[in-house]
Image (cartoon, rainbow, N blue to C red):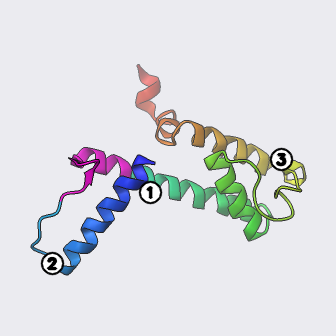
Amino acid sequence: MFRIAILANYLKCLLRKMVRPHRVLEPRYQGALVPNAVLEGILVFAVLYIGTFAGFAMIYFFLGLDLETALSASITALANVGPGVGDTIGPSGTFQTLPDTAKWCLAIEMILGRLEILAGILLLTVDFWRD
């Protein structure tokens, strides 16, 4: 939740700077200034989260799922929040009818969601495995 609060505060500062470009505004969280390194980390996380969601949703769509099911499956798996929306994977449905490839992709996406995406991407780098 703190990421969302900091990101919202940062966006509010950016919008205020658009009105008055010479104004100096620093994003704050609980009264303290947020360092640029923290802002960069939050922005990277937000972009990767949205990109992961959209990328996997496209994979599910191309595997033959309808758009509602593809979007719902992607956010359900990434956020690890339970049933999706719609007839196929909604509260009255199951993931059983999905193709096996979609199930494997959902499992990978669930792991990425649990590992905070950045740690999952770190596992794919050469430097991680070299030492």
**Image coordinates for residue 119, horizontal then vertical, percent:** 48, 35
| Residue at point 71%, 41% (across, down) | 107
**Image coordinates for residue 21, horizontal then vertical, percent:** 14, 76
Q: Which quarter of the image is occupied by the C terminus?
A: top left
| Residue at point 68%, 63% (across, down) | 71
Compared with residue 44, is residue 128 higher up or lower down, i.e. above or below? above
Compared with residue 76, is residue 57 higher up or lower down, i.e. above or below? below
Residue range corresponding to the magenta coloring: 26-42
Mark 2 and mark 3 lie on one chain; the one further toward the N terminus is: 2
Q: What is the spatial separation of the Cα atoms under label 2 and label 3, in whole angstroms?
A: 54 Å
Q: Name the residue under label 3.
A: 100
Mark 1 and mark 3 lie on one chain; the one further toward the N terminus is: 1
**Image coordinates for residue 85, horizontal then vertical, percent:** 76, 62
Q: Mark 1 points at which residue?
A: 47
Q: Which mark is residue 20?
A: 2
Question: Could you say which is closer to the camera, residue 104 or residue 15?
Answer: 15
Give the amino acid type for the residue marked by disc 2 in the picture. Answer: Arg
